Image (cartoon, grey):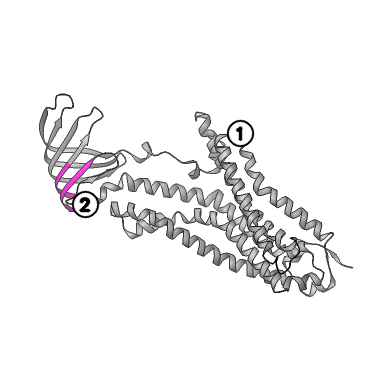
């Protein structure tokens, strides 16, 4: 008497393990190649930033490596779809799936290895979306902010007018680590008065109050904005703040906040900002579902698609790609809509959930009441 269908029994069978091994191996290789390609392209955007501030290669690789979880989270659903579609299409072309169907295996039973691979990608995606990506995004923006603000002063070039993000211009004649000879600082106050500070020697100081420059044996010249008069004052030592404390001016992006803070934000926040937090929270929960959604789209077209023929050999592949593009484009439009209407954030679950439900229903319908035939136990 045949046994009833069991998903866990199917993934333990020989043919399922064989297909799952192929899928997993190809998924790892394709995902790694995709992430490496995107990382290489995006890293070029930071070459100018690194060169402008004299960063070392170690800081460059540390900064760009923090983007890897984000790239992996983006590429994983797409690579899962491509691997499953290619593998099952190749098995169909080589008649391997046809032989298994002749042994009595239903489309639902044949789809078990791919569903297991999709669930694997789903779990990895949730680990990335809920934990790794926000943490890496937070560290990346913190590091980037320090480079553009505080740390930029640590890499002043000698003999060059260094323009800092805060509007200050610094010139040093000679440099030895954090000590300078022949320093000139030009800054403009909020009142519009221009101040020029000159000193024989200078040193960089860094504490909890931010980055400062200690000037020694110098003078201070101020140009009045109204009457253009010049005032002159000498000094022995003077401390000039270069940047305020980081925590006082850095704003946080919703993408770097943990999920708990997105849904339980402060009551003092504006309604529009709360809406952005909620949209980000729902998107973070819904996005990993695309790994399973794209998996079932590929399975539907390969196992339950239209009959094949000489002129229709590529029809399942084209149908799967167009369906994936349709749901992916619909998600982008829905994200744009929910960005303006945060009360509809829950709809972000619709596009990844809809193909899952439809494909599973059709797979069950085509499979009838799946059984394990006696020959299937030999697999």
- Residue designated by label 1: 343
Spatial separation of the CA atoms under disc 1 and disc 2: 51 Å
Q: Quadrant of the N terminus?
A: bottom right
The answer to whether residue 231 is left or right of residue 92 is: left
Residue at 13% x, 35% y: name it: 220
The magenta region covers 168-184
The answer to whether residue 231 is left or right of residue 350 is: left
Residue at 43% x, 60% y: name it: 40
Q: Disc 1 or 2, which lies upstream in sequence?
A: 2
Residue at 39% x, 54% y: name it: 63
Dot 1, crowdedness within 10 Å: few (<14), some or many (≥20)? few
Question: In the rendered structure, does residue 178 fall within the stretch colored magenta?
Answer: yes
Residue at 73% x, 54% y: name it: 359
- Residue designated by label 2: 157
Q: Secondary structure at mark 2?
A: loop
Dot 2, crowdedness within 10 Å: few (<14), some or many (≥20)? some
The image quarter containing residue 110 is bottom right
């Amino acid at each position: 008497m045949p046994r009833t269908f069991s998903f866990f029994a199917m993934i333990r069978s020989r043919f399922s393990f064989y297909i799952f091994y192929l899928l997993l191996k190809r998924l790892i290789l394709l995902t790694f190649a995709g992430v490496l390609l995107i990382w290489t392209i995006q890293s070029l955007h930071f070459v100018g930033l690194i060169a402008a501030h004299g960063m070392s290669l170690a800081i460059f690789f540390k900064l760009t490596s923090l983007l890897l979880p984000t790239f992996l989270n983006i590429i994983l659903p797409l690579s899962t779809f491509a691997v499953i579609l290619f593998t099952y299409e190749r098995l169909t072309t080589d008649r391997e799936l046809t032989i298994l169907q002749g042994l009595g295996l239903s489309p639902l039973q044949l789809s078990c290895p791919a569903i297991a691979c999709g669930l694997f990608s789903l779990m990895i995606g949730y680990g990335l979306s809920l934990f790794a990506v926000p943490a890496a995004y937070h560290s990346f923006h913190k590091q980037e902010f320090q480079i553009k603000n505080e740390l930029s002063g640590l890499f002043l070039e000698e003999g060059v007018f260094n323009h800092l993000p805060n509007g200050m211009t610094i010139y040093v004649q000679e440099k030895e680590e954090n000590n300078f000879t022949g320093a000139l600082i030009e800054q403009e106050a909020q009142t519009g008065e221009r101040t020029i500070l000159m000193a024989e020697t200078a040193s960089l100081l860094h504490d909890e109050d931010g980055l400062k420059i200690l000037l020694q044996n110098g003078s201070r010249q101020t140009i009045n904005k109204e009457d253009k008069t010049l005032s002159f004052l000498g000094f022995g030592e003077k401390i000039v703040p270069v940047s305020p404390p980081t925590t006082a001016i850095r704003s946080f992006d919703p993408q770097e906040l943990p999920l708990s803070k997105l849904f339980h934000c402060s009551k003092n926040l504006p309604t529009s900002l709360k809406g952005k937090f909620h949209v980000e929270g729902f998107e973070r929960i819904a996005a990993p579902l695309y790994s399973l959604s794209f998996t079932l789209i590929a399975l539907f077209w390969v196992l339950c698609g239209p009959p094949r023929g000489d002129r229709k050999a590529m029809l399942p592949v084209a149908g799967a790609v167009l369906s994936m593009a349709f749901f992916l484009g619909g998600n982008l439009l829905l994200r744009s809509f929910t960005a303006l209407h945060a009360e509809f954030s829950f709809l972000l679950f619709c596009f990844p959930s809809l193909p899952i439900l439809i494909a599973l229903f059709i797979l069950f319908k085509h499979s009838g009441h799946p059984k394990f035939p006696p020959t299937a136990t030999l697999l």
